[in-house]
Image: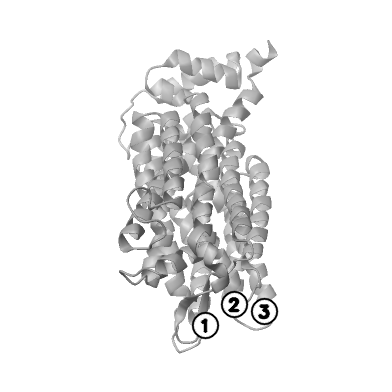
């Protein structure tokens, strides 16, 4: 009786935990490249029919992001046409195909272990397929959680999606670390030749190690695709397609029967027109959503996450993967700060303080990187930079994107916002290495301080943007968003 009146927390938690598996796969897929990219580079450097350049390697390392842009751009259409649940199932299937295909891109078509240009194209196709899954999951997982969660704990539950993303990255750091074993450096640098020689002690990494890294994703991907079949569709989507009774049943299980009727009526009051135009609530609503996504990437965090082992290696660390794992643990701990404070402190304060903390860390890296005796300062600054992101722009952006748009435009607006996120993710990831290696004169550190100095300036601008334009949504229902933007 009490469960009927007050709702079942166990039921809510169980469906949210399944949904956040999509976030875990998001983190897993985007970070797996950090451990595999050197072995992959060494493998294709052996090709006989073409020369595998740094530019090709940069594209190959980032090719999944092209799929992310496609997937996020399609997410609004799919979430509206197929529903949130079936779209997430599709994402899980794409993750699974990508994992097996990236592990064995030669499957049926090419000779095993022989690097060719055609094989490189096929590998990138599989990575793009996985990226489409990531793009779908990145937009629809927080949307799904936001639409099933009660307003008083919605921010906390959506923040668990970011925790799952970072946890997925940490898991793959550990997986890569154990797969690599002693084979840390498949490529060695020869004077005057750049990264040209393969370490004879790391042949296994070149032929097999990177395959295991990509293939390991098939396990959580298959589990996600299976479990998503057992969760319900979101009540707000069900109302939009005229299935009020089903929506009421799910709302009753989550919120209790007494609240369910009131919530259902609120949803119906705001979903009077199913096809409202994107700018029905003004340009500012869409602009704020887009810029939240842009700033989340423009602050440069994914340049650190994707290239962490390489950065720590350039700093002279003996075992860069070990420091990468340590950074992953720090990221997890500070993501929990957001999870447990977002409903108490609100969204805006966390974003502003996180921006300032990131600026401090970025400027610290800019001033200390490459200076002998300051390696600890550089490492500490990177940790401050990363930790500040994890309690602010990491989780809170997803919370706001999931809740800030009115019901009738949420699918399309979220798709546009998340597409901009992946576009800027690609821009930052693909420009980091060229910027970082820039020199005004031979041997200077111009690229080091310019890159992180630029990220620091963007962090300061992000803080001002939040202070001036982003509304506080703590404690507001999703239906309140309609009234909030109508007033604006």
Q: Is residue 466 visible?
A: no
Q: Residue at x 58, y 56 (%)?
A: 176
Q: Secondary structure at mark 3?
A: loop
Q: Residue at x 45, y 46 (%)?
A: 100
Answer with mark 2 or mark 1, whichever residue precedes in sequence. 2
Q: CA distance from mark 1 to mark 3?
A: 14 Å
Answer with mark 2 or mark 3, whichever residue precedes in sequence. 2
Q: Residue at x 65, y 18 (%)?
A: 6
Q: Report the residue marked by disc 3.
A: 374
Q: CA distance from mark 2 to mark 1?
A: 8 Å
Could you tell me residue 267's position as x and y percent? Answer: 45, 23
Could you tell me residue 397's position as x and y percent? Answer: 51, 48
Label 2 CA crowd tier, 10 Å (few <14, some 14–19, many 20+): many
Task: Give the vertical position of 38 relative to 246 (above or below).
Answer: below
Answer whether labels 2 and 1 touch (C-beta < 8 Å).
Answer: yes
Answer whether labels 1 and 3 touch (C-beta < 8 Å).
Answer: no
Task: Give the vertical position of 309 relative to 66 (above or below).
Answer: below
Q: Report the residue marked by disc 2.
A: 369
Label 1 CA crowd tier, 10 Å (few <14, some 14–19, many 20+): some
Answer whether labels 2 and 3 touch (C-beta < 8 Å).
Answer: no
Q: Report the residue marked by disc 1.
A: 445
Viewer-proximal residue, 250 or 319? Answer: 319
Q: Is residue 385 visible?
A: yes
Answer with mark 1 or mark 3, whichever residue precedes in sequence. 3
Viewer-proximal residue, 182 or 251? Answer: 182
Q: Residue furthest front?
A: 111
């Amino acid at each position: 009786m009490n469960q009927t009146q007050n709702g079942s927390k166990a039921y809510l938690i169980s469906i949210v935990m399944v949904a956040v598996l999509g976030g875990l796969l998001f983190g897993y897929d985007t970070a797996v490249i950090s451990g595999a990219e050197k072995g992959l580079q060494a493998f294709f450097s052996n090709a006989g029919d073409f020369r595998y350049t740094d530019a090709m390697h940069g594209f190959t390392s980032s090719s999944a992001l092209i799929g992310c842009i496609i997937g996020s751009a399609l997410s609004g259409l799919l979430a509206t046409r197929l529903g949130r649940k079936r779209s997430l199932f599709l994402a899980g299937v794409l993750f699974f195909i990508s994992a097996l295909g990236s592990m064995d891109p030669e499957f049926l078509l090419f000779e095993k272990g022989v690097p060719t240009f055609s094989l490189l194209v096929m590998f990138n196709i599989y990575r793009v397929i996985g990226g489409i899954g990531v793009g779908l999951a990145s937009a629809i997982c927080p949307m799904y959680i936001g639409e099933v969660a009660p307003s008083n704990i919605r921010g906390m539950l959506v923040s668990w999606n970011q925790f799952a993303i970072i946890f997925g990255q940490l898991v793959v750091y550990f997986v890569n670390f154990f797969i690599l074993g002693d084979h840390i450096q498949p490529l060695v640098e020869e004077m005057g030749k750049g990264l040209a020689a393969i370490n004879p002690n790391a042949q296994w990494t070149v032929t097999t190690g990177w395959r295991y890294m990509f293939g390991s994703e098939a396990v959580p991907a298959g589990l996600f695709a299976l479990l998503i079949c057992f969760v319900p569709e979101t009540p707000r989507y069900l109302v939009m397609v005229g299935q009020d009774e089903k929506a009421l049943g799910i709302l009753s299980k989550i919120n209790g029967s007494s609240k369910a009727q009131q919530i259902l009526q609120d949803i119906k009051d705001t979903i009077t027109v199913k096809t409202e135009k994107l700018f029905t609530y003004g340009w500012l609503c869409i602009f704020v959503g887009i810029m939240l996504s842009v700033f989340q990437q423009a602050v440069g965090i994914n340049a650190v996450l994707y290239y962490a082992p390489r950065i720590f290696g350039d700093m002279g660390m003996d075992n860069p993967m070990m420091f990468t794992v340590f950074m992953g643990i720090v990221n997890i701990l500070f993501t929990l700060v957001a999870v447990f404070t977002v409903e108490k402190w609100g969204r805006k304060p966390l974003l502003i303080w996180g921006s300032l903390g990131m600026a401090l860390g970025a400027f610290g890296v800019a001033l200390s990187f490459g200076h002998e005796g300051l390696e600890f300062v550089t490492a500490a600054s990177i940790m401050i930079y990363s930790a500040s992101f994890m309690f602010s722009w990491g989780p809170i952006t997803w919370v706001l994107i999931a809740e800030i748009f009115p019901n009738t435009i949420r699918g399309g607006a979220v798709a546009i916002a998340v597409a901009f996120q992946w576009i800027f993710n690609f821009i930052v990831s693909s420009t980091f290495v060229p910027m970082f290696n820039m020199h005004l004169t031979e041997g200077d550190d111009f690229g080091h301080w310019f890159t992180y100095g630029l990220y620091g300036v963007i962090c300061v601008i992000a803080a001002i943007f939040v202070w001036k334009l982003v509304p506080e949504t703590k404690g507001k229902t999703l239906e309140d968003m309609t009234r909030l933007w109508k007033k604006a």
